[in-house]
């Protein structure tokens, strides 16, 4: 895999570089303001190195899930502004992804300049399952530049036009962020120091069951919290009230629990509220007493203690997915407590996942206390599952 530093050594001054970056930052639902700019900051080292080497950089990125057509709610305009502030320069935003405006603005770039293309998901072809549709977009993207650099680690598990197809068309290199992420993930998959503990939370069990299956034979303990724990608790026969529940996954969770024995550790208490709101009254109950008319929105203090104790002697930890709805103040303590325990681990601690990484920062925890904070949740999970990631495979040859 050739790196962006190989490209710089080769000489990139005056050349147009298409840089796929992961700038998919969380936005405030009401104001549209960026609530955590971690991913933008993580993209700076590669971007700066290219600028300093005199490259003319066109940045391609996605934001949220627009429905394959332009939608002002998902415009990269706030990202262009923040990127410009961080770089100390103006970052113009093309009005389209790889259309007339992008071509005009790309042609006007000087050495060291940066142009941000509009949200690649404004084109339905970006995520299309139809090879020909993606190819047409990839052709237009490739025509904008001489070389391609992929630094969007958070998207390498997607066979999307701007991640996969475009790399087949022009010389391609891995950015510094992608290289660093790979380095850490390799350490997790090749003879990790033991005990090796994985902590999983977040909202969707169905998304993470495959990871659990793949990781179970490799880990010493798997701690499950967040919204996904309720499907496991239901599998143990507990009533879960109005909590998140994926009824069609209960059977699979039951089988996993039977296979794993005491290696899967579930919460023992949960913080409940009648509704999904920061103002609702909360009650903390043992997992066998979740009221029918309430939903579990965080793990309780006894669970934080239990998970903390399990993490106490760990030498390798991978944590993905918040333990509760940390976006709302009454449901932050579980995530904060477990995040602290992860950071205190004597060994390699890795945080993976957009929301988990955002939680570390939003809850005021010390980022430097972790061995590594990955920007890509889905991508790191798929890597740990041992799957081939299309965006990496295409960079390898
Ligand atoms: P990551 O981005 O780190 O991979 P996910 O996207 O899987 O994490 O999950 C993050 C989301 O899970 C957060 O928005 C959080 O509010 C939600 N969540 C956590 N616990 C619960 C819960 N008990 N009920 C509903 N949602 C939850
Ligand atoms: Mg997420």
Image (cartoon, helix red, strand yellow):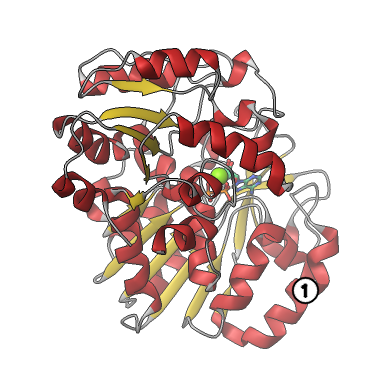
Left or right, residue 134 beside residue 309? right
Q: Badge 1: how crowded within 10 Å, few (<14), some, or many (20+)? A: some
Give the tally of numbered discs.
1
What residue do we see at 58% from left, 42% from top? Answer: 161
Could you tell me if residue 230 is visible in this image? yes
Left or right, residue 312 beside residue 118? left
Which quadrant would residue 206 be assigned to in this image?
A: bottom right
Q: Position of residue 36 (x, y in %)?
A: 40, 30
Provide the secondary structure element on which disc 1 rests: helix
Q: Position of residue 234 (x, y in %)?
A: 78, 65
The quarter of the image holding the C terminus is bottom left
Left or right, residue 220 beside residue 317? right
What residue do we see at 26% from left, 48% from top? Answer: 4
Task: Residue under label 1, please give it.
Answer: 252
Q: Quadrant of ligand 2?
A: top right
Vertical placement of 74 versus 52: above or below? Answer: above
Could you tell me if residue 94 is visible in this image? no
What residue do we see at 18% from left, 38% from top? Answer: 49
Q: Position of residue 294 (x, y in %)?
A: 76, 44
Foreground of the two, 202 or 143: 143
Foreground of the two, 73 or 392: 392
Vertical placement of 262 versus 336: above or below? Answer: below
Label 1, ligand 1: CB separation under 8 Å: no
The quarter of the image holding the N terminus is bottom left
Vertical placement of 395 versus 375: above or below? Answer: below
What residue do we see at 26% from left, 34% from top? Answer: 47
Vertical placement of 119 versus 154: above or below? Answer: above
């Amino acid at each position: 895999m050739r790196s962006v530093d190989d490209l710089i050594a080769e000489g990139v001054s005056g050349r147009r570089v298409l840089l796929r970056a992961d700038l998919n930052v969380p936005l405030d639902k009401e104001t549209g303001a960026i609530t955590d700019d971690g991913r933008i900051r993580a993209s700076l080292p590669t971007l700066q190195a290219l600028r300093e080497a005199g490259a003319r950089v066109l940045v391609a990125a996605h934001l949220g899930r627009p429905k394959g057509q332009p939608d002002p709610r998902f415009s990269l305009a706030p990202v262009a502004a923040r990127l410009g502030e961080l770089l100390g320069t103006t970052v113009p935003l093309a009005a389209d992804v790889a259309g007339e405006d992008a071509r005009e603005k790309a042609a006007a770039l000087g050495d060291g300049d940066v142009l941000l293309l509009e949200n690649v998901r404004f084109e339905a072809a970006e995520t299309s399952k139809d090879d020909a549709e993606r190819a047409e977009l990839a052709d237009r993207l490739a025509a904008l530049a001489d070389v391609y650099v992929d630094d969007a680690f958070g998207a390498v598990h997607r066979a999307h036009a701007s991640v996969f197809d475009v790399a087949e068309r022009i010389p391609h290199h891995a950015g510094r962020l992608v290289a660093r992420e790979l380095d850490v993930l390799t350490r997790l998959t090749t003879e990790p120091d033991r005990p090796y503990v994985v902590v999983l939370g977040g909202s969707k069990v169905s998304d993470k069951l495959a990871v659990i299956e793949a990781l179970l034979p490799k880990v010493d303990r798997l701690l499950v919290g967040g919204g996904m724990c309720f499907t496991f608790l239901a599998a143990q026969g507990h009533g879960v009230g109005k909590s998140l529940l994926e009824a069609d996954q209960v059977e699979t969770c039951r089988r996993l629990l039977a296979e794993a024995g005491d290696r899967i550790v579930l919460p023992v208490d949960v913080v409940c509220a009648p509704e999904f709101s920061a103002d609702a009254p909360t009650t903390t109950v043992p997992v066998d007493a979740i009221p029918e008319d309430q939903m579990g929105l965080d793990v309780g203090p006894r669970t934080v203690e239990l998970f903390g104790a399990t993490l106490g002697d760990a030498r390798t930890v991978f944590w993905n997915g918040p333990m509760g709805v940390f976006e709302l103040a009454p449901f932050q303590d579980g995530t904060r407590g477990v995040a602290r325990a992860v950071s205190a681990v004597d060994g390699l601690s890795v945080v993976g996942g957009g929301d988990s990484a955002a939680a570390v920062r939003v809850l005021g925890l010390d980022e430097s206390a972790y061995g590594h904070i990955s920007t890509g949740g889905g991508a790191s999970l798929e890597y740990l599952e041992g799957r081939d990631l299309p965006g990496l495979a295409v960079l390898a040859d």
